[in-house]
Amino acid sequence: RRILLRERYEMLNCQIAPNVAEALTKKTPIVALESTIITHGMPWPQNLDMAKSVESCVREAGATPATIAVIDGVLKIGLSATDLTHLAQTKNAAKLSRADLALCMAQKKTGATTVAATMIAANFAGISVFATGGIGGVHRGAENSFDISADLRELALTPVTVVAAGAKAILDIPKTLEVLETYGVPVICYRSDVFPAFWSARSSYPAPLRMDEAKEIALAHKMRAELSLSGGQLVANPIPLGDQIPQSEIDPMIAQALTEAAQQKITAKAVTPFLLSRVFDLTQGRSLTANIALVLNNARLAAQIAQNL
Ligand code: PSU
Ligand code: MN
């Protein structure tokens, strides 16, 4: 089977980093990490610092990090320090979701994977746990724009447990929760009775499900596989209270960013990066500090879940 897999990777131009390949062979815990957060979610040079710190965090928690991206057409599961620096500095990397991944590889281009594409690549490589900041979701005004992130449908299809700090507060949280419910995606709030709102630890929406131990989350993941259920789990891990920006403070800034996006007719893939960068400016960088803190917090929980799988 291993030889077959190797041939398949070569045919596809997929490279698994040596330490990730070793962890896969030895069945030691691995945590996948996305790269759109590096290229489209944060400014240089904090994006590179974050990418390195999140990998260290995973290692300290006893798992192997595997940051995923497409570099010159090669799907890499685990990036070298050179790749990471190159990607963090690249201005024109594509933002890859399910629709774009194979095309980017075929055209030998460079692209960063969103939650959806990272789930696909992780599952392909045999990695079950993935840590990110916040997933994409249903945008406010979706009843007119139909802007619903492909991340949600991916959670319905691909069996990876994704640890995020809830959905970004720039989104319509109740609609996002409704779509996840329709798709049969378990939304497991970690040690919380309410769904977290990314920069803020609490939203006003109750937790659809709650679990308090990484072990339980890992067991639920296994049970889904036993039942042959397609799709993953969303673990919503609140940002630590000391790092959060309370909703009352950030809400007016989100409202302003949304107004500007509408005025400038920002659409499709550009919406999320535009809003994140405007909220960064309007909070004078506080949103970035909070974003980094929550990603590290998610990496630690993801490593614990991976250890229990
Ligand atoms: N979380 C962050 N920063 C980000 C993203 C998530 O903290 O930049 C990215 C993820 O890659 C996610 C994407 O999959 O935003 C969602 O984009 P869209 O809304 O266009 O589907
Ligand atoms: Mn969208």
Image: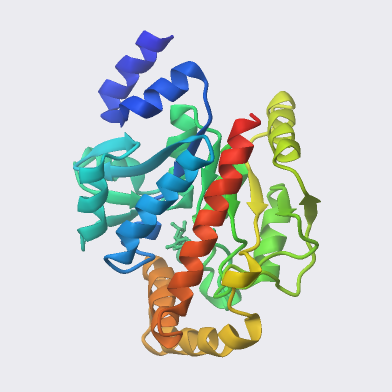
In-image side of 285 versus 295 (left or right): left
Give me the residue at 20% from left, 51% from top: 86
The furthest residue to the front: 60
Q: Position of residue 24 (x, y in %)?
A: 46, 22
In-image side of 99 versus 167 (left or right): left
**For residue 36, above or below residue 305:** below
Colouring style: rainbow
Rendered image quadrant of residue 266: bottom left
Give me the residue at 46% from left, 78% from top: 286
**For residue 289, above or below residue 100:** below
Q: Position of residue 67 (x, y in %)?
A: 38, 43
| Residue 133 visible somewhere in the drawing | no
Give the position of the C terminus as an image quadrant: top right
Depth order, front residue of 57/245: 57
**For residue 67, above or below residue 38:** above
In-image side of 248 versus 81 (left or right): right
| Residue 151 visible somewhere in the drawing | yes
Give the position of the N terminus as an image quadrant: top left
Q: Position of residue 74 (x, y in %)?
A: 24, 36
Give me the residue at 61% from left, 71% from top: 242
How many marks on residues?
0
Q: Position of residue 90 (x, y in %)?
A: 20, 58
Give me the residue at 27% from left, 22% from top: 11
Depth order, front residue of 111/280: 280
**For residue 25, above or below residue 83:** above
